[in-house]
Image: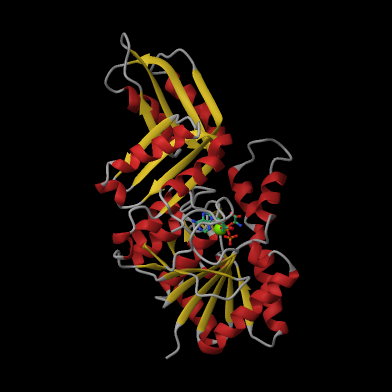
Amino acid sequence: MQQVIVQKFGGTSVGSGERIAAVAEIIKNEAEINTVVVVVSAMAGETDRLIELSKLFGDNPNTREFDALISTGEKVSASLLAMALNSLGLKAKSYSAAQVSLKTTSNFSKAKILDIDKTKMEEILADGSIPIITGFQGITETGEVTTLGRGGSDTTAVAIAASLKANRCDIYTDVDGIYTTDPRIVPNAKKLDAISMEGMLELAGQGAKVIQIRAVEFANKFKVPVRVLSSFSSGTGTMITLENDTMENAEISGIAFQTDQTKVTFTAVEDTPGIASKILGPLSELDMKVDVIVQNVGIEGKTDFTFTIATEEKSLLDEAINNIQKSINYKEVIIDDEIAKVSIVGVGIRSHAGVAAKAFQALSENEINIGMISTSEIKLTLVIKKDDLEKAVKVLHDVFELDK
Ligand code: ADP
Ligand code: ASP
Ligand code: MG
């Protein structure tokens, strides 16, 4: 029986005319067997170029216009891919998010998908046409164009797969699967044939860029089988499995990292109840995401309070600090964007106290200083200097023998 497969192609996969032609062949092959719905990202580098352009008239462009601008890259690649398919004799049509009523919340640049008009997509398929849908973008109830955050095309694809109850969502990218860490940093990283949803949620949540965290959350919630594979070479890629047993044996499933992070420290705040909420409250009112949080031991009633945010939200910090100032006293605010976060992810952390000790020792032997530490059931996150990141990832990958 014919299956419904959603195929998503990332930026490098559609980065040139030649690449678009190659992708058209992949779609053609799949469409000979199955019903195919395609989601595309903008051509490689295009979203970055548009973001640079948005600063032409000031560093903080209007958020509505910003999303209207940066969503345009996906229109270009979708249309070109439809043309490439047409040239192979296939019926294909490009659609924007608005044309398939992909409805989102109205928070620009980090909108969340609310609903997709499945009937529109079914009409296109019934007409024998392959829909090529723009990833990354959405439309609000009132018709405003939104975007879903960097890497958001993955989420578009999984959401469409969920709404169509597709048999699988294939995420085509420039690596041939999910590895124990970014293979560009650690060349001997090991490719995984399968990874559990739980493991992938943690890896993606800690920054493994290969798939957007929201996409994994969608897949988990709606039980969509997802596969990550290369559009440059053949191979079966990595399945993200809905069962959790693949991880049971792997103590550590991988190392993830993020560089686009900023550390904020309020020094000499009063060590009294309520201080954390007085600092973090104004940030959450601005919808800012705070990650690692550390409050030092108080000395003579004063303490330092430190947290990390995504650097792309740094522009909101002035307003947050203004509001914080109204309710607490402190000496100064120190802002440091030369940091990175590295996380060890795996169920082993839950049961083996030794994981942290082993990581700390390996880093100290390599003279890598740890600025902040945060742990959960299945991850250990360390904040370090950005310059130390590559070395830290290699050292940790090595000490936990993830290449084996
Ligand atoms: P696309 O444009 O196809 O969406 P991305 O650049 O967003 O591609 O994601 C693919 C990249 O993710 C890879 O080139 C690789 O450098 C990086 N990456 C980070 N962590 C991992 C990992 N654990 N496994 C595989 N790739 C990873
Ligand atoms: N083009 C968007 C970005 O660069 C979305 C994506 O690639 O998934 O973030
Ligand atoms: Mg991506």
Quarter of the image for the N terminus: give it: bottom left
Residue 337 relative to residue 349: left or right: right
Residue 75 relative to residue 366: left or right: right
Q: Position of residue 43 (x, y in %)?
A: 68, 61
Residue 177 relative to residue 54: left or right: left
Q: Position of residue 31 (x, y in %)?
A: 56, 85
Q: Tally the marks.
A: 0
Look at the image and name its color scheme: secondary structure
Residue found at the far left of this picture: 351
Look at the image and tell me whether residue 116 can be seen.
no
Residue pictured at 45% horizontal, 45% vertical: 396
Q: Position of residue 245 (x, y in %)?
A: 29, 65
Quarter of the image for the C terminus: give it: bottom left
Name the quarter showing ligand 1. Answer: bottom right
Residue found at the far top of this picture: 300
Q: Position of residue 80 (x, y in %)?
A: 70, 71
Look at the image and tell me whether residue 13 can be seen.
yes
In which image quadrant can residue 325 be found?
top left
Q: Nearer the viewer, residue 1 or 296?
A: 296
Examine the rendered structure and indicate whether residue 404 appears above or below residue 63: below
Q: Nearer the viewer, residue 45 or 79?
A: 45
Q: Nearer the viewer, residue 237 or 327?
A: 237
Residue pictured at 45% horizontal, 60% vertical: 215
